[in-house]
Image (cartoon, rainbow, N blue to C red):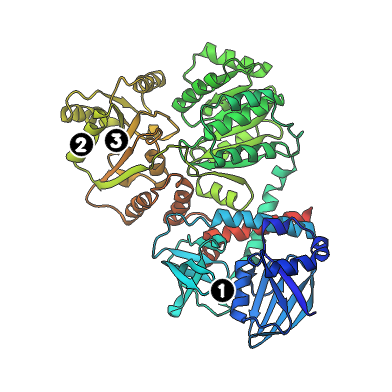
Amino acid sequence: MERTVIAGITPYFLEKGLSWFEEHEEEMAKAARGFLAGQMVLCQTGQTHRLSEFLRKLDELGYEKVFSLESPGEFTHLGGQVQVFPINTKNALRFEFLGNIIESIEKLPLAVEHEESVRRLLKKRLKSQKLFSDLRGLKQGDYLVHLDHGVARFAGTEELSLSLQGTQRYYVLEYAAKDRLFVPVGLERKLSRYVGFTEPAISKLGTVTWQKTKRRVREEVEALAKELLALYAKKEAALREPYEDPGELSQKVAASFPYQETEDQARAIQDIEEDLQKPFPMDRIVCGDVGFGKTEIALRAMVHAAEQGYQSLLMCPTTILAHQHIQTFAERLAGLPLRAAILSRLQSKKEQTETLNNLTNGTIDILIGTHRVLSSDVIFKKLGLVIIDDEQRFGVRQKEKMRQLTGPIDMLSLSATPIPRTLSMALSSLKHISMVQEPPRGRMPIRFLAAIRSKKIIREAIEQEIRRKGQVYYLHNRVGTTSQVKQDLERMIPGARCAIAHGRLPEKKLVGIMESFAKKKYDVLVATTIIENGIDLPNVNTIIVEDAALLGLAQAYQLKGRVGRSHVSSFAYFLHGRRMSPEAKLRLRALEEATELGSGYRIALRDMEIRGAGNLLGKEQSGSVNAVGLNLYCQMLAESVERLKALEN
């Protein structure tokens, strides 16, 4: 074999079959010398081609360096021999280099089987690499994992001059023995943050140790994937009629949305529509920061279900949140032939009985409720969709009970910071995940301050907010002393109108206080963590947390997100005593680092790291996770699950 072209792993080339590449071999050879030189490489025997440049080019084209070839998209390197399995050839190839000359190109016996499955898996790998390669907020000293070279310490970025191509900015990675690797900005798909439960061992460049480590972890991951697939096989066995395209009601609801959907929001809505048009139940999680439009995504899905003749259930962790949702839904569905209702302990016995009867006879299309909806007297006529809002507030048993309500049910979970187990399952493709990380237009980042608690900070923060006609959440998480704190604040800031909200208040009184606060009858709400879940009050733009050291990271992040829901600057004061545990310091540092809007997903990953959580079936996975990092481990697991699914089909 004297000449071949190696095509890059791009969406364009992955759409083409092997027969297309054979038919267009000459055109590709010409393009490789011209306008597509960045997306493929032309190799000829006798050609001068520096081995180091050839390896770098394979890296840039998206090929993964492995210990031994198995699938298209991989390459190996040993001495002057490079083996590559191109995505555009039937067989893997061996390149023999003599110095900087390609001495020979030979076909290997390893050949493509199940071409369509291979291309489908490579497309999913590209998509997952984008998800795992989120490097926003990267700081010097952070640990990164390069897919081909292992764990390194990030040393910053540098701009280097290239002889003919101007300048290029690079990520600089520091490895053992003071070796450095330069990764071009724009090729982040091979990089991921290291998230583990211990301080990582820095890899050595130029050895096969990392490739052997990946192979060992892949073998373990393969066994885990088989176990997980067996556990979830029953859930995937259920079938239902595929949904038709969204109809007139869906179009009217979409048209009545008062804002412009963000790209992420529109993509999540599209993901759900595609799930519903498949013949088996949806199991998807939408991960997006507070105030980024998850409720709108839920509403669109429920209206689509109603058009297909199904009832929907939106389950909320608190009565306050359920009450807010029913008000929002009533406004959006006004004038449409759809009926939404609420079921919670807040209603009288008579009201609950009427709601239950209407649910059973099918006159209610959308039910919004708390844990009350799991009672045995709640019977749907034709339940098709269950949505769990703030899913991290519900236990596994509660979620499974919802799944078992009746027949093959579509499940949609909404969360800003999904719990580690759920996030891990989403990352490993047992669930599907939609990321909503783009802030609504005009949204401003929250100004965050962690400081030692003092009256001066508290007084100045509240007075500043009242001067600009805003309102304040004051988080005091001890019910017994909320009255004393309210009195102290009223003495500290004369004229400030304060109210109290906590879970031990009668629910009707609690809802009444929240409604009065929403109508701006109070300036300060002294509250427990009851305000954590989904309450949307755009005029509240300062939150003061009295003892932030006692909060978990995901919970603290949720509370921080209770402000900053309008287009004015907002402030989050997380106060603490003079002494804190190392874990509490780590949590506050993570919150300080998550200054970007849309950081909830990374907070969940950081939460795994701090808590030492994240393994799926027990401690036995922690060694493998530490070896390659949680991101790469989950990526490997996702690929194994998809590969096994493809083989079954």
Local crowd at mark 3 within 10 Å, few (<14), some, or many (≥20)? many
Q: Amino acid at mark 2?
A: Glu
**Callout 1 crowding tier (Cα within 10 Å): few <14, some 14–19, many ≥20:** many
Q: Which x, y percent locates residue 397?
A: 57, 39
Query: Is 482 on the left-hand or right-hand side of 194?
Result: left
Percent x, y for residue 364? 63, 18
Nearest to viewer (mark 1 / mark 3): 1
The image shows residue 290, relative to residue 14, as above or below, that is above
The amino acid on which the numbered mark 1 sits, given as a three-letter code, is Trp
Q: In the image, which disc is placed on residue 476? A: 3
State the residue in front, 527 or 471.
Answer: 471
* Mark 2 vs mark 3, CA separation in Å: 18 Å
Of discs 2 and 3, which sits in the foreground? 2
- What residue is shown with label 2? 460
Residue at the image position 60 percent from the left and 41 percent from the top? 267
**Residue type, mark 3 in image:** His
Which image quadrant: the N terminus? bottom right
Disc ID at residue 210: 1
Task: Give how far apart the Cα atoms at labels 1 and 3 are.
Answer: 49 Å
Residue 145 in sight: yes
Q: Earlier in the sequence, mark 1 or mark 3?
A: 1
